[in-house]
C-alpha cells in the first residue's frame, strides 16, 4: 500500500467536500499509528470517516476504515446487521438472503466493506482497509443516500 496515496486521497476528499481533515500520528514503541478523521454532512446524513494505519518497523502493517453515519430522521426500515462474507447475519432472515440484503452486500463490495449495521438512525460500516480512492468515499455516500430514499426497495 502506498501511504502517500492514502494521505493524498484523504486530503483530496476533504478539500472536495470543503471540510477539515483531522490527522493525528502517535509512536507506540515499534509502531506508528496514523489516524484520519473526516466529519462530513450532506442533505441526507452526517458521516464520520475514520481511517487508521498501523505501521510497524517489522513490516506488520494493518489498516482499516470505519464509517459512522447519523441520519437526520429515522429510516423507514428495521434495524439490521450484515457481514459481507459467506456467513450473513441478519436479525430478520436467519436462513435465506432477501433481495434487500443481496443489494446491500453488492453495494458493500464496491468499496470492500465487510460489515454494516443499522441501529435506529445510526449506521456503522467497517472495511478491512483504509480508503485509498475517492470512489470508495463516494460509494459509501451513495449507499447511505439510497438507503434513505429507497429503504427496503434498495
Image (tube, grey):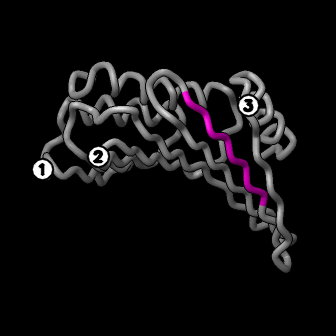
User: In this picture, is 144 found above or below 149?
Assistant: below
Q: Earlier in the sequence, mark 2 or mark 3?
A: 3
Q: Position of residue 27 (x, y in %)?
A: 85, 71
Measured along the vertical axis of the image, is residue 152 above or below residue 114? above
On screen, residue 65 versus residue 93, left or right, reads right
Q: Which residue is mark 2?
A: 120
x%, y% of residue 136?
60, 31
In the displayed structure image, the side of residue 13 where residue 141 appears, left or right: left
Residue pointed to by mark 3? 14
SS at mark 1?
Answer: loop
Residue 95 placement (x, y as % from top left): 12, 50
Residue at figure coordinates x 67%, y 56% from the top left: 63
Instruction: Please tell me which of labels 2 and 1 falls first in the chain.
Output: 1
**Which of the 4 image quadrants contains residue 14?**
top right
- Residue at disc 2, secondary structure: loop
The circle on residue 95 is 1
Which class describes the residues within 10 Å of circle 3: few (<14), some (14-19), or many (20+)? some
Considering the whole magenta stretch, tell me its main secondary structure. strand
Which of the two residues, 68 or 125, is positioned nearer the viewer here?
A: 68
Is 94 displayed left or right of 120 in the figure? left
Residues drawn in magenta: 34-41
Residue at 73% x, 24% y is 18
* Residue 52 rendering spot, x and y as whole percentages: 69, 55
Amino acid at each position: 500500500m502506498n501511504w502517500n496515496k492514502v494521505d493524498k486521497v484523504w486530503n483530496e476528499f476533504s478539500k472536495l467536500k470543503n471540510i477539515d481533515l483531522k490527522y493525528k500520528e502517535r509512536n507506540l514503541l515499534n509502531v506508528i499509528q496514523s489516524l484520519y478523521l473526516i466529519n462530513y454532512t450532506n442533505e441526507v446524513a452526517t458521516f464520520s470517516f475514520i481511517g487508521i494505519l498501523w505501521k510497524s518497523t517489522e513490516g506488520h502493517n494493518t489498516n482499516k476504515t470505519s464509517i459512522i453515519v447519523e441520519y437526520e430522521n429515522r429510516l423507514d426500515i428495521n434495524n439490521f446487521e450484515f457481514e459481507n462474507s459467506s456467513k450473513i447475519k441478519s436479525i430478520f432472515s436467519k436462513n435465506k438472503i432477501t433481495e434487500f440484503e443481496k443489494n446491500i452486500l453488492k453495494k458493500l463490495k464496491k468499496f470492500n466493506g465487510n460489515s454494516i449495521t443499522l441501529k435506529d438512525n445510526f449506521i456503522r460500516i467497517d472495511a478491512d482497509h483504509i480508503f485509498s480512492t475517492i470512489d470508495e468515499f463516494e460509494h459509501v455516500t451513495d449507499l447511505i443516500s439510497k438507503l434513505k430514499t429507497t429503504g427496503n426497495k434498495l
